[in-house]
Image (cartoon, rainbow, N blue to C red):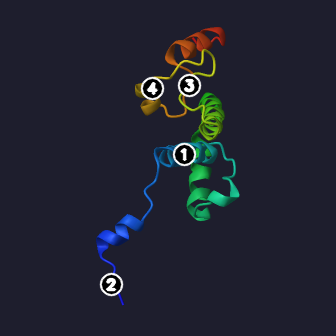
Amino acid sequence: MQVETSKAKSKKRKRKTKKELLREKLVLERDKRLIALGQPLPRNEMHSSDDLDRCQVTIETNMSVSTRQRKQQELAEIRIAIQMLEEGEYGYCQDCEDKISQKRLKTRPWATRCIECQCEHEKTAGWQ
């Protein structure tokens, strides 16, 4: 009988890829916004219902309409980013198709537009 060393065990453990880590981060951000908006989490990713219920009631009570709209917009952007990640298009601007800067993606991992296109989008949408 051969005894496995801790080194051998650690080699067997699968390290998560950058894509897996990024997906986890995006899913967490999505879930935060779903909770804040009072929407249910996807069934395969449920958390403790007591904690979530308490959190949901508190957030719903304190959330203003503009904050709620912003959270809904961020949630939509996160869903698009997850889809782009799955399709191999993550990190590219949905408007001009240039690469989105790593600094921007680090700050806002669900960004679907480069900073220039986002500024233009906000101007045309009347946000500025």
Sooner in the amino-acid sequence: mark 4 or mark 1: 1
**Residue 23: mark:** 1
Give how far apart the Cα atoms at labels 4 and 3 are.
11 Å
Circles 2 and 1: CB atoms closer than 8 Å: no
> Which residue carries the number 2 mark?
3
Relative vertical location of residue 88 with respect to residue 119 in this rendering, above or below? below
Question: Mark 2: which secondary structure?
Answer: loop
Circle 3 residue? 92
**Sequence order check, earlier mark of 2 and 1:** 2
What element does badge 3 sit on?
Answer: loop
Secondary structure category for the residue under label 4:
helix
Image location (x, y in percent) of residue 114 = 52, 19
The residue under the point 43% across, 56% down is 15
Q: Residue furthest bottom?
A: 1
Q: Residue furthest front?
A: 1
For this rendering, which residue is in front, 73 or 37?
A: 73
- 3D distance between C-alphas at marks 4 and 2: 48 Å
Distance of label 3 from label 2 (alpha carbons) = 48 Å
What residue sits right under mark 4 in the picture? 104
Q: Earlier in the sequence, mark 4 or mark 2?
A: 2
Give amino acid for label 3.
Tyr
